[in-house]
Image (cartoon, rainbow, N blue to C red):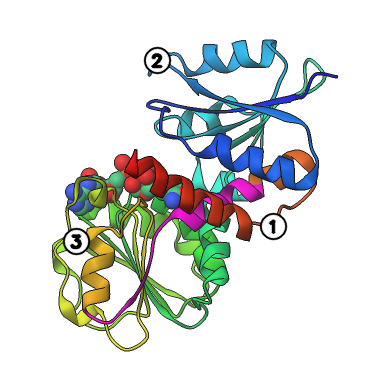
Amino acid sequence: STPLLYAVIGNPIEHSRSPLIHRAFARQLGIELAYEKIWAPIDGFEETVAAFIERGGRGMNVTVPFKLEAFDLAGGHSERARRALAANTLVFPTNPGEPIYADNTDGVGLVNDLAFHGVKIADRRLLILGAGGATRGVLAPLLQEAPRELVVANRNPDRAYGLVEEFSDAAGDCLLSGCPLAGIEESRFDLIINATPASLSAQLPPLPDALIGAGTAAYDMAYGAEPTVFMDWAEERGAHALDGLGMLVEQAAESFALWHGKRPDTAPVREQLRQEIREAAER
Ligand code: NDP
């Protein structure tokens, strides 16, 4: 029989680790699948998806810059995708005429990765750097865990204020606020999440030392063979630093569970991916 067909779509897409992760999950659970990388032109997302469905594609992961378009393309949405207005996971209908279903597993991926590392959210003070698509995707799932306070800090502060307004009804008892990246209150946070791509160009946002104290965790959504500049900055000041590799594996696990109805064990795949990234850097 032909294996079930899946893919990750983006632009650029060459460096995506999603095929490695999904193939590892499939091996672990004895599921036969094919998982491809698909590059789409910036103005050709819909046509590329249609051609993939035509070939028998059952589902897709969606990455930069198509998450908003993926949401718009779908006729059915999970609650968390509706909150984010963005989708990283699509399920294609097996019967013609049925709608495409969209989900967003990025936020639960972050929350599950923090839990994996024993980082607590409930009743804690959280700071998120950045107000782009990644922050939009994780805000509701983070607020669901009932932090005491959550500050969104962004270079363009209006984007931070906008998100705060948009998510105020999901805040519950959490004190949710926005501020300029260069104007963060000089007090200690329990968890600082870097949701900017600054680390990818070895840039460090302007952060006061006072943000870090005993027990602070610093989480960079970026990842690579070496700790990022943000992780180095945080660790030098006594924080416990984590990169975004676990989030990537956990969001994939959630997509996998949606498609296949089975939840993979992420621990061995984290290890495998870490090793693969190290080896790729040495090549
Ligand atoms: P966006 O382009 O949507 O948003 C980028 C945000 O970062 C904006 O708020 C922008 O500020 C800010 N920013 C960009 N460059 C800098 C800089 N040099 N200094 C300070 N702030 C900066 O990106 P995404 O939100 O989609 O992604 C953010 C990062 O998260 C990426 O590195 C992405 O790879 C990573 N990511 C990781 C995931 C994982 O699974 N590990 C999942 C999703 C994302 P402004 O508004 O002022 O321009």
Q: Which residue is identified by label 2?
A: 43
Q: Earlier in the sequence, mark 2 or mark 1?
A: 2
Chain part drawn in magenta: 237-254
User: Is 148 above or below relative to 61?
Assistant: below
Q: Is mark 3 within 8 Å of ligand 1?
A: yes
State which quadrant residue 227 falls in: bottom left
User: As drawn, which residue projects farthest toward the right?
Assistant: 1
Q: Are marks 2 and 1 in contact (CB under 8 Å)?
A: no
Q: CA distance from mark 2 to mark 1?
A: 37 Å
User: As drawn, which residue projects farthest toward the front?
Assistant: 283
Residue 185 as seen in the image, left or right of residue 244: left
Residue 262 as seen in the image, left or right of residue 256: right
Q: Which residue is identified by label 3?
A: 181
Q: Amino acid at mark 1?
A: Asp
Which of the two residues, 211 or 204, is positioned nearer the viewer here? 204
Label 3 vs label 1, nearer the camera: 1
Residue 64 image position (x, y, % from top left) = 41, 34
Bin the neighbour count of mark 3 within 10 Å (Cα to Cα): few under 14, some 14-19, many 20 and up: many
Secondary structure type for disc 3? helix
Which of the two residues, 83 or 258, is positioned nearer the viewer here? 258
Q: Are marks 3 and 1 in contact (CB under 8 Å)?
A: no
Q: Amino acid at mark 2?
A: Asp
